[in-house]
Amino acid sequence: MRSRIGDTTPNDPVAPDSAIATPPSQLPERTRSAIAAVVGAGNVLEEPRERLERSGGLSYLDLLRRRQPTAGIPTPDGVVLPGSPKQVQQVLDVCVEHDVGVVPFGGGTSVVGGVTAFRGDKKAVIVLDLERLNRLVSVDPISRTAVLQAGVRAPDAERMLSAHGFTLGHVPQSFERATIGGFAATRSAGQASSGYGRFEDMVTGVRLATPRGEWELGVAPASAAGPDLRQLAIGSEGTLGVITEVAVRVRPLPDSEHFEAVAVDGWERGSGLVRELAQQGLLADITRLSDVDETAVQLQLAGTWKTSALRRYLSARGVDSPCLLVLSWHGESADRRKKAMRLLRSGGGVWLTSAPARAWLRGRFGGPRQRDALLDAGVCVETLETATHWSKLGTLYDRVRTALRRELGHPLIMCHVSHAYETGASLYFTVLTPRDPEDPIGQWERAKAAACEAISADRVGTISHHHAVGMDHAPYLTAEIGELGRDVLAAAKRAVDPTGILNPGKLIG
């Protein structure tokens, strides 16, 4: 790391929670009593630590603020744990009556300010933690659908579905903590989305609690009964209702998983080959292309870049700037895999055995934890993501990197494509640079703003492919959907939440 970004200044010792200033709860006693009458007094939490634990997500800035006692963390006035969809609706009814803000909370993995306890114009704000909504409601093996409560964490969903011989196949990096409701609320995309689809592709129905009453959507696999309002609820980020149940399409557990790793010479050729795979219907369930910088780091961490042997091997085969392509096929896919590997070889790809792919698989959930060690070492480390059409991919890639370098000097910027489509692909950037000890928060805020402006300029890319909008991306949403689009969202908000209690400040501000 030092050879790439230079020396860093280790962080001061992490402040214990008890050192972080937590303002007293502003939840009126009358409101607390009314909520307690619904969920039980033991499910209304007001201790400082309990509120602090649900005070935000897991972005770099969230983590940084929790390490600094004076940084100022928006803290909810209470945490409420409802035990059923009915109780969620009843709690919302109380909050409407008392004009109290409500922040829905699942796994707390948002990295864009989606669960920040912002109160807006409300006198108090509560976090509605859905951890007790943790049931598999039903499985329909004939239709291959299942209904899960919103608070079910992803590993538990897989465990419960596997008992019936099924899988959801949705595995984002947040998999260990994230919830079914969170996946739906943010239009999540998993690492195997090329095979299983994005989460919105899996949703067949959704049940929400809203300030106007319960709202259930989805009665058939397809419908021409007007616009698909399920897609309005999915991605609404808790601003149009609290998702309490999600009906999803499930698939039989695969009987095998086959891994491959291929090195391609350069980012342009690599992304071109992924485009060909996508447009010929040959994508693996997991198709992940790393650029030159990310490839070098991955191979070093995997222990396969310690000597010059691999470099000589690749160079002899025309690969001087290796980009690593990780592939994984699930179930019966031998013919598709054979055709894909033939295409890659004809395009100059060099097979590397399955070892680099399996090394990636073993460490794929390590990034979020690794940030803590990097923060200790004085590193500013964060990610951002976007997507665009194939014809603009190179432009977007260059724009974001240029914007980040302009603000940060000489950072290490790594990028990969992890989601490919017939018409385009995502770009996921990871940035490491020495942390500014004088203004660490402002350092990243300026860099992120520069990157967002580069993405939004000329509508070259989307402000978010799968991290959602939250508060961080809200200033850039209008550039993507237009003033009219924003007015449509605002009208929907007024229709279901006329007093604006739901997740203040998110999505449309």
Image (tube, grey):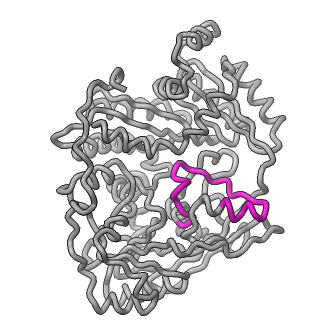
Report the residue at 51% width, 41% height from top: 388
The picture places residue 395, in percent across and down from the top left corner, at 45, 31
Report the residue at 38% width, 36% height from top: 431
In magenta stretch: residue 165:
yes
Residue 458 is at least partly visible in this image: no
Q: Quadrant of the N terminus?
A: top left
Residue 171 is at least partly visible in this image: yes
The magenta stretch is: 158-181
Numbered marks: total? 0
The picture places residue 199, in percent across and down from the top left corner, at 60, 57
When asked about the image quadrant of residue 25, the answer is bottom left
In magenta stretch: residue 154:
no
Report the residue at 44% width, 37% height from top: 429
Q: Quadrant of the C terminus?
A: bottom left
The picture places residue 209, in percent across and down from the top left corner, at 51, 80
Main SS of residues in magenta: loop
- Front residue of 434/248: it is 434
- Front residue of 213/492: it is 213
Left or right placement of residue 240 versus residue 116 in this view: right
Q: Is residue 230 above or below residue 412?
A: below
When asked about the image quadrant of residue 230, the answer is bottom right
The picture places residue 424, in percent across and down from the top left corner, at 58, 40
